[in-house]
Amino acid sequence: MMKALKYISAALLIAAFALPSQAQVVKKKKDSDKEKQKSEQVSDRLQARFEQKKASDSDIQWQRIIYRSLDLNKAENMPLYYPEEPGADGMNLFFIIMKNLANNSLSAYEYLDGREMFTDEYRVKVSDMFDRFHILYDKAKGSSEKNPKYVVENADIPANEVLSYYILEKYEFNRLNSKVTRKVDAICPVLHRSDDFGGEAIKYPMFWVKMSDLRPFIVNQYVFTDNDNNLLKTNLDDYFADNNYKGEIYKYKNLRNLSMMQMFPDETKRKHAQDSIEKRLASFDANIWVPSREELQEMAAKRDSIEAAKNPEEVKDKKNDNKHSTVRSTRAKSKRAESKSDSKKKETKVKTTKVKTSSNAARSVRRRK
């Protein structure tokens, strides 16, 4: 009887310990389902960005810093300018920057023309920037010295005068994935403003904003990228990440801190230097590895197709020449083959006649004996 009670109590204890563990397993399964559901709601590109390991300075084996000027009159850059005023389609990039600067949720840094330092020492005081560019503002409720906030009306924001942007690009080669990445590190709105006497507008670079600080405010702003499709499918973050803009190189980081205009005053030489930089940047990733035989064949086919599109008559002449040359070569080969066969026949005839004469001579000698 006592033994039976001991067995029953042991069984109850085992069941008591087993139940919480089973409940815990079920709970983990529910948590995993929730995490899976959340991951499905996040886009693949955004999820890949979070999962990607951030490269350290030791992993970067090569870097090139390029300054570009984005003209908003070009079709590729118009998504940064429109809509001109905030509305149902949201607001343009400059409105987003100014609203967040006034709310003290974004930091701006001085424009130092190639000597940019994104530190607190070079952080722009927003009220001073408003005064410098004659932008009207009022202090917002709850504003303080440590947390200054301002109110700026939409009509007082000079978005129609910001007709270009400067961007700071970084090209980096990472040895971990053996790839060259191109990213926008900072952006600077440029004010085009004429003086009181009119004339040609003067460019005033306002300030730099780090793209990493600006990204949370532009990831939900969708823009038009094609006039044939009126659906807002691309946000400003994807627009910069996919390099959908088109900008001219006006400077690259160098020891003398000179711009392209200073190094190449002549316009043709400057354009040639810009094109050579673009080619080197585009071909750096391709020149790291030796191309395979298939890639070389594809490159040769592309070159032939480009030449055919440019000079179709020359390509026809080359094809005709190749045909004639092949016909001539086949005829020459056939003639050589015939001549070889004729020479072989002659040689065989000569050999046979020699053998006959030698045998007759031997017979005649034997008869004489």
Image: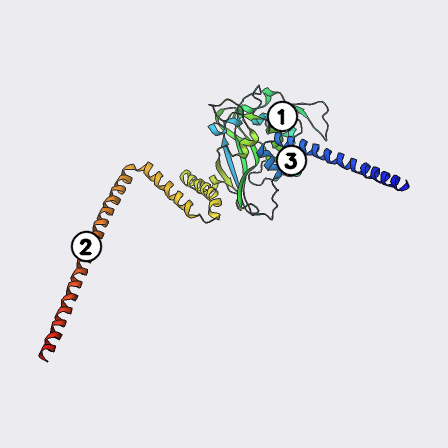
SS class of the residue under badge 2? Answer: helix
Query: Residue shown at 40%/43% (left/top)?
Result: 298
Residue 205 appears in the figure: no
The quadrant where residue 345 appears: bottom left
Residue 310: image quadrant is top left
Q: Amino acid at mark 2?
A: Glu
Q: Is residue 135 above or below residue 171?
A: above
The three-letter code of the residue at mark 3 reads Arg
Residue receiving disc 1: 99
Q: Residue at x 33, y 36 (%)?
A: 309
Among numbered discs 3 and 1, the one appearing first in the sequence: 1
Left or right: 202 with respect to 216?
A: left
Per the image, the residue denoted by label 2 is 338
Q: Pick whichever of labels 3 and 2 is earlier in the sequence.
A: 3
For the C terminus, the quadrant is: bottom left
Residue situated furthest bottom in the rendering: 369
Q: Viewer-proximal residue, 19 or 135? A: 19
The residue furthest right is: 2
Nearer mark to the viewer, of 3 and 2: 2
Classify residue 21 as left or right of residue 289: right
Could you tell me how far apart the alpha carbons at marks 3 and 1 are, in whole angstroms?
Answer: 17 Å
**Residue 243, image x, y percentages:** 51, 34
Q: Which residue is mark 3?
A: 123
Element marked by disc 1: helix
Residue 220 percent across, percent down from the top left: 60, 27
In the structure shown, which secondary structural element does the residue marked by tag 3 occupy?
A: loop
Q: Nearer the viewer, residue 284 or 167?
A: 284
